Image (tube, rainbow, N blue to C red):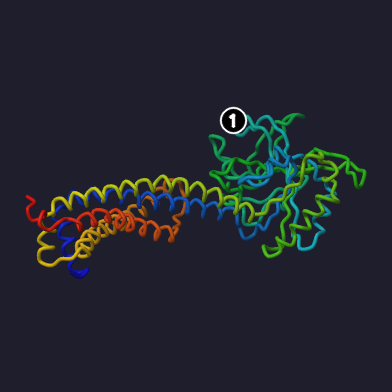
């Protein structure tokens, strides 16, 4: 008996028992659908995060100082709140002089207690002091960067929506410093991509110029003068091709010659984080999470395999007399095995195909609900389908072998 005949007989059996066949393939559908849904969601999350981190105009190396244990992890370098303000103006100037460095942007925290706008006051901890180079020209939704020496601020979109009345360019905010309140003018609102967070919605950020707001100073070991000291500096290479060359030079200077290397505690170290390193860490975390969730979904495939094996065993019992007739007219063991294996594979294929459609729809719905653009992982589609078909094949082996062992005389006597 050829495969075509086996397919026709198997399809007739499946068609004659529609409900049973649907219930049998349901485990495969759920398993394959779950795998593809979670993998698609993981791919979409990864694409969104990587897209936010790797912007073409930002080949950056972020430097900070802190305990060695706090310098690792998917969040990149430790935040300004845990990094010590040890990068002096002298360090900033020396970094600017390195080969293939486009700009150096220092950042530090300025403590405040509250922010007021249009008669409404909210509690606040700190604002970020930086330089105009911190913002690209195309990063503004409206307005411009601040001018050094002026009472001006720049907000990101989440910060502009903190109050019941949205803050717009030209509005006035009142920042409550330790020294007293100070009115500042909002001169720019950053667009969403400029301060997007790698792990969810961006946090509200308020940026002020270092001059006149930032007052943290230390005595420079090199010059002997008191200078502003920052908790973080971002070194931008002229382009991505030069990041790998600039990073060792930055690391060498900050670790050996800088004021920061002499101001930091002996147990602390300089941490450098590039966009690519951050992307690699993010991909590793997301990949691990996706694999874990996908592993749970594979349990459904195991349940589906058990379902197919069970229904094939039932089918063998129901068709014992048919098997006896096939053997009586010359059917071989391999024909019987082929017949039941083809039926099991058909069920596996149906479950895999329908499960793929369900998985794509589920992945799309999940990505839309979270707000990510849809991204696919094609190799997982192939793996999920192959596993679904393989499940059907493996789960049909024992029932097929069991059917082939039936004695034709006993089979013909079977009622």
Q: Quadrant of the N terminus?
A: bottom left
Location of residue 353 (image quadrant)? bottom left
| Residue 256 located left or right of residue 401 | right
**How many neighbours does mark 1 have within 10 angstroms: few (below 14), some (14-19), or many (20 or more)?**
few
Whether residue 147 is visible, yes or no, is no
**Residue drawn at the location 22% of the way across and 54% of the way down:** 402
Q: Nearer the viewer, residue 350 or 328?
A: 328
* Label 1 secondary element: strand
Q: Nearer the viewer, residue 7 or 132?
A: 7
- Residue 253 horizontal/vertical position (percent): 82, 53
**Residue drawn at the location 75% of the way across and 53% of the way down:** 104
Tally the marks. Answer: 1
**Residue drawn at the location 27% of the way across and 59% of the way down:** 345
Q: Nearer the viewer, residue 406 or 78?
A: 406
| Residue placed furthest toward the right | 224
**Residue drawn at the location 78% of the way across and 55% of the way down:** 250
Q: Nearer the viewer, residue 234 or 265?
A: 265
| Residue 73 located left or right of residue 343 | right
- Residue 372 horizontal/vertical position (percent): 47, 51
| Residue 54 located left or right of residue 292 | right
- Residue 311 horizontal/vertical position (percent): 21, 49
- Residue 191 horizontal/vertical position (percent): 58, 50
Q: Label 1: which residue?
A: 120
Location of residue 118 (image quadrant)? top right
Whether residue 267 is visible, yes or no, is yes
Location of residue 411 (image quadrant)? bottom left
């Amino acid at each position: 008996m050829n495969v075509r005949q086996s397919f026709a007989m198997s399809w007739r059996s499946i068609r004659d028992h529609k409900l049973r066949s649907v219930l049998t393939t349901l485990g495969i559908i759920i398993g394959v659908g779950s795998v593809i849904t979670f993998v698609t969601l993981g791919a979409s999350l990864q694409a969104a995060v990587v897209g936010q981190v790797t912007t073409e105009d930002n080949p950056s190396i972020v430097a900070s100082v802190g305990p060695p244990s706090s310098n690792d992890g998917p969040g990149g370098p430790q935040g300004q709140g845990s990094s010590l303000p040890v990068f002096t103006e002298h360090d900033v100037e020396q970094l600017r002089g390195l080969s293939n460095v486009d700009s150096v942007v220092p950042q530090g925290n300025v403590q405040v207690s509250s922010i007021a706008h249009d008669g409404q006051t909210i509690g606040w901890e700190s604002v970020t002091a930086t330089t105009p180079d911190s913002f690209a020209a195309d990063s503004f939704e409206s307005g411009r960067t601040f001018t050094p020496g002026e009472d001006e601020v720049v907000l990101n979109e989440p910060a502009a929506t903190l109050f019941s009345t949205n803050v717009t360019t030209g509005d006035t905010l009142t920042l409550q410093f330790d020294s007293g309140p100070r009115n500042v003018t909002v001169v720019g609102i950053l667009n969403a991509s400029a301060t997007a967070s790698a792990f969810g919605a961006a946090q509200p950020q308020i940026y002020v110029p270092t001059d006149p707001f930032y007052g943290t100073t230390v005595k420079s070991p090199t010059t002997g003068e008191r200078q502003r000291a920052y908790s973080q500096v971002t070194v931008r290479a002229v382009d991505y091709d030069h990041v790998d060359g600039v990073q060792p030079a930055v690391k060498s200077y900050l670790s050996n010659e800088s004021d920061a290397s002499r101001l930091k505690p002996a147990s602390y170290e300089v941490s450098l984080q590039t966009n690519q390193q951050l992307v690699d860490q993010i991909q590793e975390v997301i990949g691990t999470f996706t694999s874990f969730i996908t592993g749970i979904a594979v349990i459904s495939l195991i349940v589906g395999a058990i379902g197919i094996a069970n229904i094939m065993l039932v089918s063998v019992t129901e068709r014992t007399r048919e098997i006896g007739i096939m053997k009586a007219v010359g059917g071989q063991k391999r024909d019987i095995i082929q017949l039941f294996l083809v039926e099991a594979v058909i069920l596996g294929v149906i479950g895999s195909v329908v499960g793929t459609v369900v998985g794509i729809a589920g992945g799309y719905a999940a990505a839309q609900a979270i707000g990510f653009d849809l991204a696919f992982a094609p190799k997982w589609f192939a793996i999920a389908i192959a596993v679904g078909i393989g499940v059907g094949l493996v789960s049909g082996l024992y029932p097929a072998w069991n059917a082939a062992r039936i004695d034709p005389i006993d089979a013909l006597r079977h009622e």
